[in-house]
Amino acid sequence: MGEQVTGLDALSGVLAELIALWNTHAVADEVRVDASIDAHTVIAVRALTAHAVECGRGVLALVAVGHVVVAVPVVRTMIEDAVCAAWLAKTEDGWKGFIREGADDRRKLMADVVAVGDAALGDAPFGEPAEVERRRMAEILDQYDEYKRERKFEHRARSATGAGLVYMQYRMASNLSHAGTGIVDLYTAAQPGSATRVAWVDEPRNVSAEGWVTIAASSLLRAMRTWDQMIPERPLRDALSRVADALGPRAVM
C-alpha cells in the first residue's frame, strides 16, 4: 500500500500519470480482447475511455491556469464516461439500451432539423439528409425497443458502483455546469449596505481545485479499469492498482 498523495500538484500528477499510461497503451497496433464480451460493449467502453482521457487533458490544462470552475463541466463529462463504461461492462445486453438511447436522441435531433430545414446542419458530419437519418434512427429504435431499462444516469451510477457517492459528485458537478442558481451563487455575494444588497464577484469562491482534480482522476481510473477488464491479460492492472493506492479511499471504485 503506497502513501496517499495530497495537494493539487500531486493530484494533478496522478491524473497526468493516468493519461501517460493510456498514451503508452493506446499506441499498440493490436489488442486481443475477451471474446466472451460482446463487440458492441468493447467498442463503446474503448471510446468512452478514450474520451475520458481527452477530457482529463482538458481538466489539467484549465486547472493549471486557474480556471477551475470552467473545468467542472469537463469533470462531469468524465464522470458520465466512466459510469456508462462501467455500467455497460456490468450489464448484460446493456449495449442494446445504449444504442437505443443514442438512436432516440439522434432521431429527435433530426426531427428538429427537418422542421427547420437541412441547412440548419451546416457542416455537421451526418452524411445524409435529416429525414433519411431520422428514418434510420427510427428503425434502430424499433429494433431495440424493449431495451429501455436504466436510461437514467442515477440508475446507471448506482448499478455500476453500488453506492450513491458517484451520483452525488455528478449532481455537484451538474450544479456548476448548467445556467442556474449554482452559477449565480458563485458570482455574487451579500452586501447589505448596497442598493441591490448584492456584490459582484469576478473570481468564484469555494471551488476546490484539489477536490475536482481528485474526482477527475478517480473517474479516469474507473474508466481505464473497465477497459482493462476487456483484455484477458489485464495489461494495465498493476499500474492502475498503484494509482488507486495513491488516491486511497478517494478512488471510489
Image (cartoon, grey):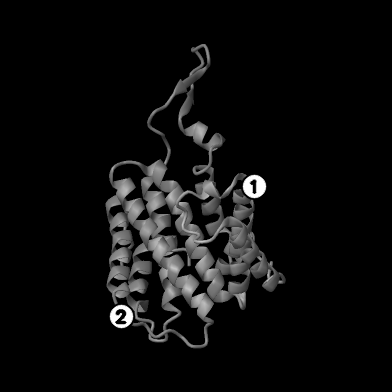
Residue at x-position 37% and y-position 53% = 213
Above or below 134: residue 97: below
223 to the left or right of 165: left
Do tag 1 and tag 2 residues touch (Cβ < 8 Å)? no
Nearest the viewer among 113 and 100 is 113
Nearest the viewer among 167 and 178 is 178
Mark 2 crowd level (few <14, some 14–19, many ≥20, 10 Å Cα): few
What residue is shown with label 2? 29
What residue is shown with label 1? 115
Question: Where's residue 123, x and y in %?
Answer: 45, 52
Residue at x-position 52% and y-position 87% = 36
Element at badge 2?
loop
Residue 15 in view here: yes
Going from N to C along the chain, the mark reached first, 1 or 2, is 2
The residue type indicated by label 2 comes to Asp
Quadrant where the N terminus lies?
A: bottom left
